[in-house]
Amino acid sequence: MAKYGIFVGTAGGTSMKVADVLAEEFGIDEDDIINMEEDFDDVEEQLLEYDVLFLGSSTWGQGDLHFSWVDPILEIEDDGIDFSGKTVAFFGAGDCKKHGEHFCSALGKLHQTFTNAGAKAIGAIAKDDYKYEFSLAEIDGKFCGLGIDEHNESEKTPERIEQWVGLLKSELGE
Ligand SMILES: Cc1cc2nc3c(=O)[nH]c(=O)nc-3n(C[C@H](O)[C@H](O)[C@H](O)COP(=O)(O)O)c2cc1C
């Protein structure tokens, strides 16, 4: 049976909202929800332990990942760690009004690193539901994962998560 894990970089816990629903919907154990800042210390022992990885990060600075992702991402890229055979999906919180010039760009950065490392990405959605000037999460005309915006569009969050979970289940054949 495929092993599922959730890895989240979050400052205020907003991105964890998505993680909590994913855990419930996919029956993921609490021990398999890894808060990158608090619980993460080894790429090979932790990330590579899973077959299906739900990877979350809020976006900071000029479209940067949460700081807790910076070292693992460098390690994956510099050491050429191989994620072939793994399935990955991306999510995270952002702010489309104050930071519309880089809305949820962290998802695009995760996408780039993990697909370059050989992983298969799932969970891309139509971008029409979002309003922003620019986002690295926009890849091949779609949003490469689930962005949520609790500052401006919190009323859309439950439905966005529900629809995304439905998409993931169908792409994973569940
Ligand atoms: C200094 C600063 C920079 C930010 N930069 C971005 C950004 O580039 N893109 C974006 O979508 N959101 C940006 N945000 C908004 C955060 O991503 C947003 O508050 C998010 O809800 C935080 O989620 P978290 O609690 O999971 O960390 C920024 C916020 C701050 C305070």
Image (cartoon, helix red, strand yellow):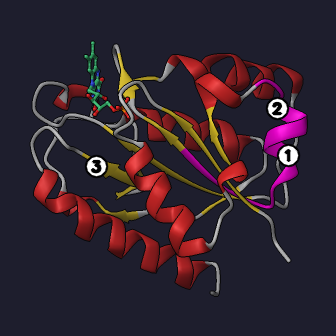
Residue 13 occupies quadrant: top left
Q: Which residue is mark 2?
A: 43
Estimate the spatial distance between the alpha carbons at disc 2 and disc 3, rounded to whole Å.
26 Å
Residue 8 occupies quadrant: top right
Q: Which residue is mark 1?
A: 48
Q: Is residue 53 visible?
A: yes
Q: Residues within 10 Å of mark 1 (few under 14, many from 20)?
A: some
Q: Residues within 10 Å of mark 2 (few under 14, many from 20)?
A: some
Q: Is mark 3 within 8 Å of ligand 1?
A: yes
Estimate the spatial distance between the alpha carbons at disc 3 and disc 1, rounded to whole Å.
27 Å
| Marked residue nearer the N-terminal end (2 or 3) | 2
Q: Residues within 10 Å of mark 3 (few under 14, many from 20)?
A: many
Mark 2 belongs to which amino acid? Val
- Residue 76: image x %, image y %? 78, 29
Query: Which portion, as a residue range, is magenta?
Result: 41-55
- Residue 92: image x %, image y %? 40, 43
Circles 1, 2 touching at the beta carbon (< 8 Å): yes
Circles 2, 3 touching at the beta carbon (< 8 Å): no
Residue 156 shown in magenta: no
Mark 1 belongs to which amino acid? Leu
The vertical placement of 128 against 151, above or below, is below
Q: Residue at x 13, y 47 (%)?
A: 131
Badge 2 marks a residue whose secondary structure is helix
- Residue 137: image x %, image y %? 40, 43
Mark 3 belongs to which amino acid? Ile
Which quadrant of the frame does ligand 1 lie within? top left
- Residue 98: image x %, image y %? 12, 25
| Marked residue nearer the N-terminal end (3 or 1) | 1
Q: Which mark is residue 148?
A: 3
The vertical placement of 24 against 114, above or below, is below
| Marked residue nearer the N-terminal end (1 or 2) | 2
